[in-house]
Amino acid sequence: METLNPLSGFFSAIEKDYRIIITHIGIYAALLQYRQEQGFANPVTAFSYDIMHIAKISAPATYHKCVRELSEYGYIRYVPSFKRNQGSRIYFLENG
């Protein structure tokens, strides 16, 4: 059940955050799933298409907008690579 703690913490944190929509939640949950698959690494190095597949999101613009916003809002730290052959780094923050 320890794998649910980050998701529970995220839901507690977003309870009163009106900026968070269902797409943010889906991407955050997909990031947690991906992180688990990577052995709970922090940060994880991921390509957008990997996370989009898990989150069932087909538009890259939607993915990038929501990940950037999650980072701006303080739930994750997103460091884009801007390189086709190198994944972006996503840090999971303890308060999110």
Image (spheres, rainbow, N blue to C red):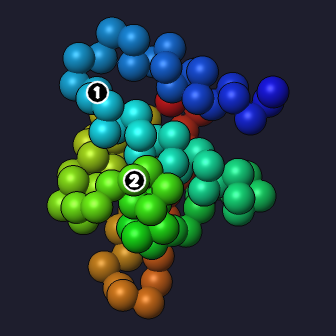
- Determine whether 3 is above or below 71 in the image: above
Residue at 30% of width from left, 17% of height from top? 17
Mark 1 vs mark 2: in front = 2
Residue at 52% of width from left, 50% of height from top? 31
Q: Which residue is mark 2?
A: 56
Residue at 46% of width from left, 83% of height from top? 86
Instruction: Indicate the amino acid at tag 2.
Output: Lys
Q: Position of residue 60 (x, y in %)?
A: 24, 65
**Which of 92/33 is in front?**
33
Q: Secondary structure at mark 1?
A: loop
**Which of 90/48 is in front?**
48
Taking the image as shown, residue 63 lies to the left or right of residue 89, namely: left
Q: Residue furthest top?
A: 16
Instruction: Indicate the amino acid at tag 1.
Output: Ile
Q: Position of residue 58 (x, y in %)?
A: 28, 61
Q: Position of residue 4 (x, y in %)?
A: 69, 29
The quadrant where residue 92 appears: top right
Q: Secondary structure at mark 2?
A: loop
- Whole-angstrom CA distance, mark 1 to mark 2, is 18 Å
Q: Position of residue 1 (x, y in %)?
A: 81, 27
Taking the image as shown, residue 42 lies to the left or right of residue 57, namely: right
- Determine whether 72 is above or below 15 in the image: below
Residue at 51% of width from left, 48% of height from top? 30
- Determine whether 15 is above or below 34 in the image: above
Q: Which residue is mark 1?
A: 20
The quadrant where residue 57 appears: bottom left
